[in-house]
Amino acid sequence: MNNKDYVKIKNKIENEENSILIIANGSSVLSFNYGKLIDKFQTVARINNYSTVNYKSLIGQKTDIWFNGANQGLKKRKIANEKIIVFVPASIQYNKPHRLNKISKRLGVTRNQYILISKEEMLSYEKSAKITRLTTGLSSILWSINNYNKVIIHGFDFFQKSKGHYFDNKIKTFLINYGVIKIGTKHDNILEKEFVNQLINKKNVITLENYLKI
């Protein structure tokens, strides 16, 4: 990208009102050096155990919203000014509400530092997608559609091209690819991919790659 194109795209990003860019954890993000442009977006959201260390040139470092599922494997992180949005499956909230008491401990924050999306809203996401027990990624897209005029997504691979995350080390990646470590088995990743493609076709969301085209 030449300097003229960069300036043009940067101006487009900075003039975009009420927009959100959601960076997922798919390994496809390693194919693009979008870091400088990503940090120009009005609102940048990241998911679960995201990492920007050593990946700044690829995915930037700005983080305005941390979307997570308060799952058992969630890593505590130093929270600066990020807004924390927690998606716990509707089935758990309805049938095992005692699990909600573990959220603060798992996140390492107090109750007033995060927003738990209600069981009613989580159920509405499932009905909209016609899928039960949505991933944090799909939940974040549907939440964003309800709260922003433009939703841009990046790194949503749905464990299709690669079974792991961009930040997994070589050993973990090897174990995941050979099925020793199971990831995403509680979710219907194929149906989620199809649903998100429908959202893209309807122009409810747009991929970052397409958004950045001149």
Image: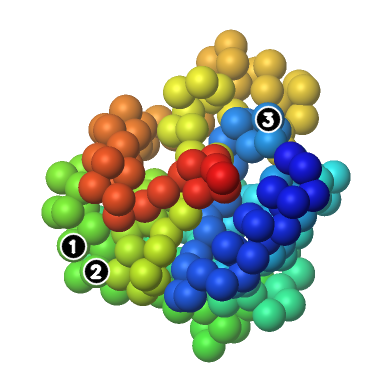
Q: How many marks?
A: 3
Residue 105 percent location from the top left of the image: 60, 70
Mark-to-mark CA distance, 2 and 1 = 5 Å
38 horizontally vs 151: left or right: right
Residue 160 percent location from the top left of the image: 45, 23
Q: Quadrant of the C terminus?
A: top right
Q: Residues within 10 Å of mark 1 (few under 14, many from 20)?
A: some
Seen in the picture, residue 49 relative to 100 is either above or below; the reply is above
Q: Which secondary structure, mark 3? A: helix
The residue that mark 1 highlights is 124
- x 47%, y 68%: residue: 19
- x 69%, y 36%: residue: 32
Amino acid on which the number 2 mark rests in the picture: Glu
Q: Circles 2 and 1: CB distance less than 8 Å?
A: yes
209 horizontally vs 50: left or right: left
Q: Nearer the viewer, mark 2 or mark 3?
A: 3
Q: Residues within 10 Å of mark 2 (few under 14, many from 20)?
A: some
Mark-to-mark CA distance, 2 and 3 = 35 Å
Q: Quadrant of the N terminus?
A: top right
The residue that mark 3 highlights is 31
The residue that mark 2 highlights is 121
Q: Residues within 10 Å of mark 3 (few under 14, many from 20)?
A: few
Residue 198 percent location from the top left of the image: 25, 40
Amino acid on which the number 3 mark rests in the picture: Ser
Q: Which secondary structure, mark 1? A: helix
Residue 73 percent location from the top left of the image: 59, 48
Q: Nearer the viewer, residue 41 or 73?
A: 41
- x 58%, y 63%: residue: 12
Amino acid on which the number 1 mark rests in the picture: Ser
Q: Earlier in the sequence, mark 2 or mark 3?
A: 3
Q: Nearer the viewer, mark 1 or mark 3?
A: 3
The colour mode here is rainbow
